[in-house]
Amino acid sequence: MAEKAKNLQVYNTLSRKKERFEPLNPPHVGMYVCGPTVYGDAHLGHAKSYVSFDVILRYLRYLEYNVRYVQNITDVGHLVDDAEVGEDKLSKQARIEKVQPMEIAEKYTYTYFRDMDALNVLRPDIAPRATGHIPEQISMVKKLIENGHAYEVNGNVYFDVSSDPEYGKLSGRKTEDAESGTRVETASDKHSPEDFALWKKADQEHIMKWDSPWGVGYPGWHVECSAMSTKYLGESFDIHGGGLENQFPHHECEIAQAECAHDKEFVKYWLHNNMVTLEGQKMGKSLGNAINLHEFFTGDHELLTRAWPPEVIRFFLLQSHYRSTTDFSEDALSASETGLKSLHSMINTIDGAEAGNGEVFDLDGLKNSIEGVMNDDFNSAQAIAILFEQLKEIRKQITDKKTPSNIEEIKEFLHDFVDGVLGIWPQEGGGNEELTKGLIELLIEIRKDARSNKNFELSDKIRDDLKELGVQLMDGKEGTSFEIE
């Protein structure tokens, strides 16, 4: 394992502090992130979560860890409002669209991956579906009953929260403070309001149902992640991620199920991303203010004035820390688009430069600075700020005909980090750097002639108009150079 991996610090929600990252079986890392419930299109909140964990995954691999990344697809068991009684989210959407629930699952699983692909989010190594792992979930429920942590009532099986003295250690919520989870309706046959469903009895009209030792039914929402994560990553693994809203009750219940079933620590590091807000209010389907990603890409939404490219959305999200709130506005997207164009312009200039006789650029210093902030709980925002500052200096050396002699090593690092970790490398055909450079140099020549002819009005107009376009002209003894801001 590379030396640089030893300095990684991650914020562990379980301990409520930053800890040195020390995986259970280095260089192998097991990472599980709660995937979508596929009853609708992915929105900006989903993008915040999955872009954040995409960068975490990419950076761990940059540090030369061998990561197995698992992200589930919830296609059964997640009831409306995260409740213990009521209607399954997919069944409700199927009723609205007048199709079968599995048609809903197929439709929105497809659109989810379509939109994540557009955002350049790497696909997980394994994407297990809840409906494909009913036997594993039944096996875990049976084990919990055998261990005295669950009970069956009239075909329903519930986890007995009072049997687990550590319940609440992730969220800090005590059982006496809980009201059967959050926003939930209490099932009448539970021993205690805090207990949660492991298996639900299905009525005759319910389509998504399976045989079990307790009768025909379907799994509770929480048990799928405990069963599938341990199936593919082992009974103890390194990282479990998800949105902050999943901390309670979902992740709290996952811990209780897994640790009471296997009698060992479930997950070493719990990572949670914060939310996206619109004018200070959380964006989400239930609040009616969510803009789905396809609407961003096409501009087809009343809150949008135009279409926004996926790479701009990704860059916008990377400019805030994954544990910070990201407040959405089109002004913020516009600023991100300008910033991304500037970054791409600098990268294209550097990537197209040939080795010169300039001084050696301090590449080790650049690497150490970027890895230093990324090792501080994956701070992509700070890494981007450092990139802007340092790449401006490299481009200035190139435009001054003093290209660093180690330009090839600089290019290699930029590919490794900007492409490999941040996932925001300039797209081929996205612009013609040589044409842009040639046109600017042509205008500089016209300006030079204007000044020679004492046509200072035209000279100043060229300078000022270029400045408005983000091109800064710098007059010096050796002539005029330029910098694209």
Image: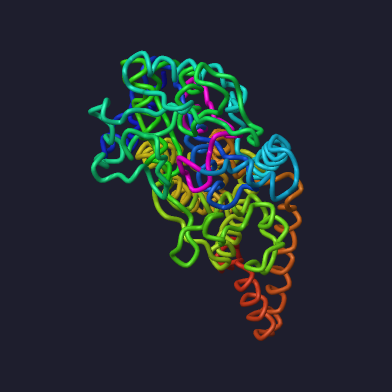
Residue 131 in the image: state x and y as whole percent. 61, 26
Q: Nearer the viewer, residue 169 or 213?
A: 213
Q: Nearer the viewer, residue 102 or 396?
A: 102
Residue 447 in the image: state x and y as whole percent. 69, 74
Is residue 80 inside the magenta stretch? yes
Residue at 28% across, 32% down: 167
Residue 111, above or below 333: above
Residue 271 in the image: state x and y as whole percent. 39, 37
Number of marks drawn: 0
Q: From the viewer's perspective, is 174 left or right of 110? A: left
Q: Is residue 390 in view from this perspective?
A: yes
Q: Nearer the viewer, residue 16 or 313?
A: 16
Residue 193, above or below 201: below
- From which residue to which does the magenta span run? 58-85
Residue at 65% across, 48% down: 41
Is residue 106 inside the magenta stretch? no
Q: Is residue 476 in view from this perspective?
A: no
Q: Quarter of the image holding residue 218?
A: top right
Colouring: rainbow
Q: From the viewer's perspective, is 128 left or right of 110? A: left
Residue at 62% across, 51% down: 344
Q: Nearer the viewer, residue 75 or 45?
A: 75
Residue 313 in the image: state x and y as whole percent. 59, 53
Could you tell me which quadrant the N terminus lies in? top left
Could you tell me which quadrant the C terminus lies in? bottom right
